[in-house]
Amino acid sequence: MAGDGVLRQQQLHRFYSDHHGWLQGWLRRRLGCSQHAADLAQDTFVRILARDQDVASIREPRAYLHTIAKGLLANHWRRRQVEQAYLEALALQPEQVVPSPETRALIVETLLEVDALLARLPDKVRRAFLMSQLQGLTYAAIGEALGVSERMVKKYMAQAMLHCLALQDAS
């Protein structure tokens, strides 16, 4: 019914008006930047809109907003870490090798996807995969470092590769 839509819109407006300033202030104190705080506050409310949730039924609205914003804040810091590491690696390259801003943005997005993929792996599987791929260690050396057999390292690597393939098939 049309009346339900109007009521929902009024509830959302009230929810936003009651809590936006508080949330943005909380984020500003964490970030030290009012612009990033404003962006993350908006992203928090967009998440709530996307869930199509009845905001009137939320018992502890600030705790609820805090939980959502904390997750977004963690993503923000992780993204900054990945970007910073990439920019530091890029600074070591000769100027003629430096990619365009568009290519850099695509590379950062890809790095974030790889980071998210690795974060989903169990700890020893992730560590074995990284030691093999980034450090070029043998399975025997990885097994020694992780305190497992070479056979277990092979299982870890197979698990990591299957995970990568499953994600590739999903996209």
Image: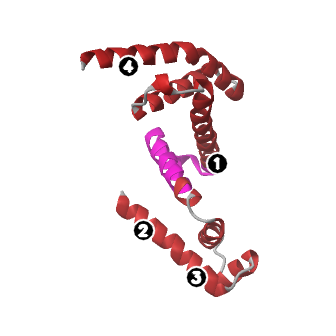
Which mark is nearer the camera, 1 or 3? 3
Which mark is nearer the camera, 4 or 1? 4
Position above or below: 150 against 56? below
Residue 30 in the magenta stretch? The answer is no
C-alpha span from label 4 to label 3 = 55 Å
- The circle drawn on residue 8 is 4
Pointer 4 with pointer 1, Cβ within 8 A: no
Position above or below: 80 against 56? below
Q: Return the residue at label 3.
A: 154
C-alpha span from label 3 to label 2 = 16 Å
Query: Would you identify the image quadrant in which residue 40 lies?
Result: top right
Q: Return the residue at label 1.
A: 85
Position above or below: 120 against 127? above
Judge from the rendering whether residue 7 lies leftward or rightward of residue 134; answer left or right.
left
- The circle drawn on residue 165 is 2
C-alpha span from label 4 to label 1 = 44 Å
The x, y position of residue 29, in whole percent, is 71, 23
The x, y position of residue 59, in whole percent, is 57, 26
